[in-house]
Image (cartoon, rainbow, N blue to C red):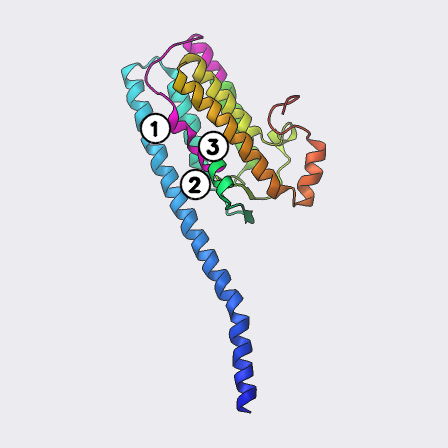
Amino acid sequence: MATRRHGTATALAASGRPCAAHDAEGFVGILIEVFARVVAALALGVFAYAAYTQWRLDPSRITLILLAVSMTLTVGLSLFAEPPTKRDWSPLALLFSLGGTYYYLVFQLTASRQLIPETFGAAIQLFGLFWQLFAKLSLRKSFGILPANRGVVSRGAYRFVRHPMYLGYLIIDTGFLLTNFSTRNLLAVALQIGLQVGRIYREERILFEDVAYRAYKRSVRYRMIPGLF
């Protein structure tokens, strides 16, 4: 009898270990999620304040405000995103995702050379901003910083390209660069492009495991830029 009771207790303890490990992993994931969102909010606050300070010096710099609005939408909405069903925590995914999110901190916000008039640059940014909003509304709460499967979305802007939000970022940054041209800003945009491309490939590695996404890929050929990529 004692042996039987001991065997039963051992079996119960063994069966409880996976649950305990899963709970611990879930708790660590929550802590990382909270930490990432707090850091995102602080970084955004620093950037927004710096942009506002520069705008106060020259209120005609509309592109500066539009850049800050775009980043507020990008980072701000990620703070309220729904938890994903699967996430990529690999170092490479973290590099692409965090770099592709916080690259805006590299931008030179002080006045620099204008290749096109401020109003033209602002018009480009507004188009990119509306496209970004269209993509975000299409995505709803299925949005975050790290590569993850938050469910396949094929409505709205996602009928045209598979990653329309990144196209919006590129358009907005291009408008800012053309009216605030400097070596540093050129490097910031080049960095953004490289990181977002890497981010797209990491995201699709996870999404391709989903049968629904593979079907979606067959109907929407291009990732970000129609006819090109």
Q: Which residue is drawn at 52% across and 80% down?
A: 9
Distance of label 3 from label 2 (alpha carbons): 16 Å
Which residue occupies 27% across, 16% down? 57
Disc nearer the start of the sequence (1/3): 1
Give the structural element (helix, strand or loop) at label 3. helix
Q: Nearer the viewer, residue 55 or 187?
A: 187
Give the CA distance from mark 2 to mark 1.
16 Å
| Circle number at residue 100 | 3
Q: In which quarter of the image is the N terminus?
A: bottom right
Name the secondary structure under disc 1.
helix
Task: Determine whether 149 is above or below 161 in the image.
Answer: below
Identify which amino acid the numbered label 3 is placed on.
Gly
Q: In the rendered image, is residue 207 in sight?
A: yes
Q: Position of residue 183 (x, y in %)?
A: 40, 16
Query: Mark 2 or mark 1: which comes first in sequence?
Result: 1
Q: Is residue 63 something that shows in the picture?
A: no
Please say whether residue 16 is one of the residues in the magenta stretch: no
Q: Count of labels shown?
A: 3
* Quarter of the image where the C terminus is located: top right
Check contact, mark 3 vs mark 2: CB within 8 A. Answer: no
Secondary structure found at label 2: loop
**Residue 48 shows which numbered tag?**
1
Residue 79 shows which numbered tag?
A: 2
Considering the whole magenta stretch, tell me its main secondary structure: helix
Residue bounds of the magenta highlight = 97-124
Q: Which picture quadrant has residue 38?
A: top left
- Farthest residue toward the front? 91
Q: Position of residue 114 (x, y in %)?
A: 40, 9
Mark 2 is surrounded, within 10 Å at the Cα level, by few (under 14), some (14 to 19) or many (20 or more) other residues, namely some
Q: Which residue lies furthest to the bottom in this view?
A: 1
Q: What residue type is labelled 2?
A: Leu
Q: Which amino acid does label 1 sit on?
A: Ala
